[in-house]
Amino acid sequence: MADRIAPNPPSPYATADPNTRHLLPGLFGEPRPATLAPTGCDRLAVVPAEALRAAGDSNAFPPGICDTCIAAWYAALRGQELPDDRPTTDCRECQSQTRHDGLCALCRQDAHEEWTRTTEGAR
């Protein structure tokens, strides 16, 4: 059995489960490492420096991958989407509708970039 894959890097602005690794669909090309990107489970996670490597069997995922991301991947293969019953609210910064706990994806990405600059500058 393969070793458990490391979770995505941390960020106070990530909304994905911090204890698992998330699939990053790359809807707009390959996401840049250290940025906050949409996940297969419709959350946001930091893009790790090391990409996931394809397993010998294209349907096999290493241990530690988010179960919802895997379910979304299989649903996408069938041309379906997983339902998302999270409530929408207004973003506290720009007032757009969001399912990301009161701060929309774009505002979270901006805040994550600022947080990254601040924390790297403090080192």
Image (tube, rainbow, N blue to C red):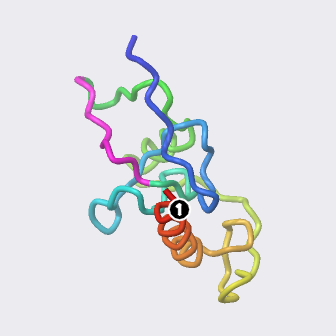
Vertical relation: 68 (above or below) 56: below
| Residue at image point 65% right, 86% down | 96
Q: Is residue 17 left or right of residue 81?
A: right
Q: Is residue 2 left or right of residue 123?
A: left
Q: Position of residue 78 (x, y in %)?
A: 40, 47
Identify which residue, 75 or 120, lies in the foreground: 120
Q: Amino acid at mark 1?
A: Ala
Q: Which residues are magenta?
A: 47-56
Identify which residue, 97 or 107, lies in the foreground: 107
Q: Residue furthest bottom?
A: 94
Quarter of the rendering containing residue 34: bottom left
Vertical relation: 121 (above or below) 67: below
Q: Position of residue 101 (x, y in %)?
A: 73, 66
Q: Position of residue 108 (x, y in %)?
A: 58, 71
Identify which residue, 84 or 29, lies in the foreground: 29
Is label 1 in a helix, a strand or a loop? Answer: loop
| Residue at image point 77% right, 67% down | 87
* Residue that carries the numbered disc 1 in the rendered image: 122
Number of other residues with Cα within 10 Å of mark 1, as a class: few under 14, some 14 to 19, many 20 or more: few
Report the number of discs.
Answer: 1
Residue 69 on the magenta span: no
Q: Position of residue 6 (x, y in %)?
A: 46, 32
Residue 53 on the magenta span: yes
